[in-house]
Each structure stands twice: as C-alpha cells, then as structure tokens.
Image (cartoon, rainbow, N blue to C red):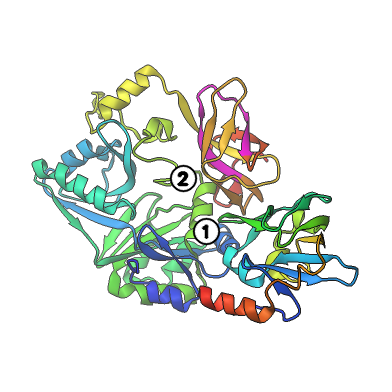
Amino acid sequence: MSEVPGDLRYTKDHEWLRQMEDGTVLTGITDHAQDALGDLVFVEVPTVGDKLLAGDACAVVESVKAASDVYCPIDAEITEVNDALADSPELINSDPYGEGWLMRIQPEDAEAVEALMSAEEYEELLQDED
Amino acid sequence: MGNKTPLFESHVESGGRMVDFGGWDMPVHYGSQLEEHHAVRRSAGMFDVSHMTVVDLTGSRSGEFLQRLLANDVAKLKTRGKALYSCMLAEDGGILDDLIVYFFDDNNYRMVVNAATREKDLEWIKEKAASFEVEVNERDDLAMIAVQGPRARETAAAVLPAHLREQALALRPFAGAACDDYFIARTGYTGEDGWEIILPAGLASKFWASLAKAGVVACGLGARDTLRLEAGMNLYGTDMDESTSPLESGLGWTIAWQDSEGGDRQFIGSAALREQKAAGIARKFVGLVLQDRGVLRGHQRILVDGEDDGITTSGTYSPTLECSIGMGRVPAATGSNCRVEIRGRRLAARVVKPPFVRNGKACIEL
C-alpha cells in the first residue's frame, strides 16, 4: 500500500501539494506514482518564472521504461525547481514527499489548493483504480 | 486474462509487477529494474522466457527445408546442439521474425521464435514445410529460463541435476546439449555469458526456486530490454519488422549469400535482397549515444545535416553507461553526429556501431 500523508492535497494525476507558510506551494508526484513508474532516471523541470494554467504539462519524469508528463495542478507561477533532481532523479523514488519534491509554485488563487482532493479522497481514488 | 507461463505463480509470489506482453502475463520487474539490470552485468540474473515459442522440426529433409526457410545457412551447424541466429524472411525480403535454430542431428532441429509472432510463424513454417515432408511440432509442454551474468553458469551449475553439470559447463558459446528432459545452450540476449535452459514445464517452478536460493536474481522484461539494448541486439517488432529487410536492420551479417561451394543460395526472400543490394541500401541501422541530458525512445525524429530525417527504433537509459542510448535508421551517408528531436528540443547525439556493452564493459567511448 502506498503512503498518502494526511496533511497534503492531491490531484487525479497523482501529484501532491503542500501549502507553505509563505503562501507558496511545494509540489511533487505521489508515492503511488513513483512506484508505478519504477526507477526514475531523468527529470525535466519547468523554467522558473513560467506562468502555467491548471492542467498544463510542465515537467516530465522518465523511468527506465517510459516518459510521463507531470501537469501543473493549479494556475500558478513557477518560483523554484528542485535542481537536485538533475543529478539524482532517484530522490523521487526514495523520498517522493520530501527530497524528491519537483517544484515550488505561487498560486494565482490562494484558495485553489484547498479545493483539491484531501488525503482521504485520494486514497479512495487509488482504491478505485486497483 | 492473458496466457500464463508455468512460472506465473512464482512471479506473483516474488512480487513481480505483471504486465501484458504480446498476450502473455509477464513480470516487468520485481521491485527495481535497475538492480535487476546490474545483477546481470555484475553477478547473475534469471529471466522467465517460457512465453517464447519452441518449435521442433523432424524429417530427413529438415536441413534442406531450413536452408530454404532461413536467410542464414544451417549447413554451418555441424556439431550436435550448435546454435545459429537467423532471420526468417517474406518473399519481398521483409523480416517475418528473428530466431535461434539448434541442430540436433540431420533429421532433427529446434527453433525458438518470438512470442508475439507465434501464430503467424507457425502458419508460415507449416505451409512451407509441407512440400519437404517435415513435421512441425510446437512444444508448449516446455518452459524456458535464461540465466545470465558473469557468475550465471557457475551458480546455475550447482543447482542442475548432478549428471548434467559437467556437460553443461563444457559448452562453448552458441553450443547446446540435450540431456534427459533438459536442453541447455550457452546463448542469451544480454551480452553476458550464461545459459538458456529449456526444461519440462512441470519442473520449472522448482528449478526457478532453487536458482533463487542459490542467489540468482529474478529479472523482469524491463531489465531484459535495457540489457539487450546495451548489447546492441535487435528486438523484433521494434527495431525491425515485415517492412524492413535485414540489410537495413544491421543484420547483413546474418545473411548467408553463398553455400559452402560458393554457389548463390536460394532462400525465401533472397531474390529481393539481391535486388536491394544491387540498387544500394538507402538507410543504415546505427547505434546512438545521447550527448545531452534526456532519454532516447523509439519513434523519435533523427536530424542529419544535408540529409533526410532518420528515426529511432529503440531507446532507453543505459544503467551501465549512465547515459541514454538508442538505435535507429538514418540515411546511408550519415556521419558520426546527428540530432534527435525530443519534445520539441533537438539534442546532440553521436552515431556509433553497437554493441554498447559486452561482458560488463563499455564497448564505446563516452
């Protein structure tokens, strides 16, 4: 069973969001997503300053087997990307909710994060997928 | 639900991530594809390849039949158990399948063909065999396990039935031996030493378990793909198919144009191949090493200065070389550099001659 921390928000595309105190939001892919992808070997992150709409493909994570798009979860500006992933994409496998974070975004609408799925709702989604 | 090999339960019990592969439920990995890959390069790994199709040919004209059926020449096989890699072609020179054929004796040969092409191959082989009065028997009563890696033979030998060990360890590369119910050949699809072991389906799960106990790492189809790509070995349906000939698939070396007396061999597709050769081959099959960060995959556009575009057929991240490698078709005049378009970006790649890795060592300069 994959790990689903209770204090995060989730999307149906298996991304997680963590609301930070400074108003920014950290995002990454979930434990379920990294497990399904397998060993990650390459990550393409967006450019800092990019303004994206919810649903825009903004990053690519590639495992040994295949490439997968990561979508911007909400309308937002990219304010920071995890540069460590360039040399160590496996951080996403070993610590998807911590060192394997993907990008920091500044939401267009501060309320948008809360409107996403709770941990409970995301767990239900995972059960339905099985 | 797909077809299941005799080892299906073993895979599920070992945590194998099962996927559909050409109609078969097969493990793609058992946790980490990278660790499985490294196990084969550094020690010993095993693969369930029971989904592949084993076909036995019997009849006094079997050799003559295979000389007609295959682009390589089974007359090269003189000792019992010896193996030959060959393409099986359509009349137009397109590749119907690639396979290994083993020589047992003048009346008996064994072929191992791909799983995804099973129906098509069997139909074709039976149709062509009829006029040679060769009997074609599919052996779905057998399982097949590949044990590969620098320590594969010594580790697997210890769990073989005692009376087979000496004979198995004495096998030279590309040679095989039948003993009781087992057929063991020093062949593989990884670029490492090892054996492919064909055995009765009923013995497979016990043998698999004893290999695991001896320290051989179970490996899935994912590692099998990265290993074969590093070894520069083509995958049927990906790197070549009915629309491509061996001459544009890097497989010219597998065509036996002449018999031992120097006469032109006449096999199915030979006339078309001779025409292609005379006209000149427009595209060549090459290896690619990505110079920039990214991962090559199949179906990516290859850009060559002053020439038409090429296309990648396979690509992956190479766990051994720690960069991305691939294979593809490019215009014959392509030099040592090209660019590959990945998600709109044109990344620099070097054109090399496979293999990339053999026996754990890089074969190309990085």
* Residue B129: x %, y % from top left: 14, 44
Q: Chain of mark 1?
A: B
| Rendered view: A105 above or below B200 | above
Looking at the picture, which amino acid does disc 1 mark? Answer: Ala
Residue B188 visible from this viewpoint: yes
Circle 1 sits on which residue? B223
Q: Nearer the viewer, residue B159 or B322?
A: B322
Instruction: Assess disc 1: are there few (<14), some (14-19) or many (≥20) residues with their C-alpha within 10 Å of its C-alpha.
Output: many
* Residue B253: x %, y % from top left: 40, 33
Residue B134 relative to residue B231: left or right: left
B329 magenta-colored:
yes
Secondary-structure class at tag 1: helix
Q: Quadrant of residue A122?
A: bottom right
Circle 2 sits on which residue? B233
Residue B103 relative to residue A129: left or right: left
Q: Nearer the viewer, residue A2 or A16?
A: A16
Looking at the picture, which amino acid does disc 2 mark? Answer: Met
State the residue at coordinates (54%, 78%).
Answer: A127
State the residue at coordinates (25%, 48%).
Answer: B121
| Rendered view: B230 above or below A122 | above
Q: Nearer the viewer, residue B181 or B161?
A: B181
Extreme-right residue of the structure:
A22
B175 magenta-colored:
no
Magenta segment, which residues? B325-341
Q: Quadrant of residue B41?
A: bottom right
Q: Chain of mark 2?
A: B
Secondary-structure class at tag 2: loop
SS assignment for the magenta stretch, majority: strand
| Rendered view: B191 above or below B364 | below
